[in-house]
Image (cartoon, helix red, strand yellow):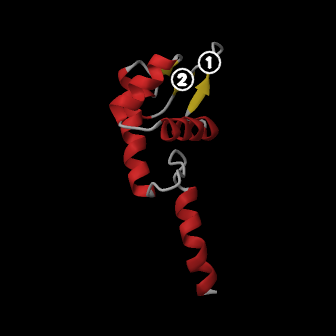
Amino acid sequence: MIRKTLIALPFLALAACDDVPYVPGVPMQTMAEKVAAYDLAVASIGCRMIGESDYLAVEFQADLTREESVAITEAKLSSGNAERLEDGGVLVTNGACAA
């Protein structure tokens, strides 16, 4: 019984981190810091990412790769902390961007 619990603990910890996606080769603690930097960067551009210039600004400010930026955005969309805009962009709705 204890063995099954110990095996399940890492998965439970990951499930609790809604906006912290898995990116191969990047430790989860580091990704949590990158998500926080992403949130601040998105807030600095008005919480909307519509065009390439918006994504580049967020990636530059938060020191993210494109893969990390896309993974974080997808995690926010799937957890309900962001929504797709009609023009194809994304509106982040949590953290500093919470209404």
Q: Residue at 59% across / 86% down in the picture?
A: 2
Amino acid under label 1? Leu
Q: In the depicted view, which residue is nearer to us: 58 or 80?
A: 58
Residue placed at 55% from the left, 41% from the top? 71
**Can you say which quadrant of the picture contains the N terminus?**
bottom right
**Residue that mark 1 sits on:** 85
Residue 96, visible in the rendered structure: no
Q: Residue at x 60, y 41 (%)?
A: 79
Task: Return the mark for residue 91.
Answer: 2
The label on residue 3 is none
Q: Amino acid at mark 2?
A: Leu
Left or right of 41 in this view: 54 = right
Dots 2, 1 in contact, CB < 8 A: yes
Q: Is residue 49 above or below residue 61?
A: above
Crowding near the residue tagged with mark 1, few <14, some 14–19, many ≥20 C-alpha atoms within 10 Å: few
98 or 78, nearer to the observer: 78
- Cα gap from disc 2 to disc 1, whole angstroms: 7 Å
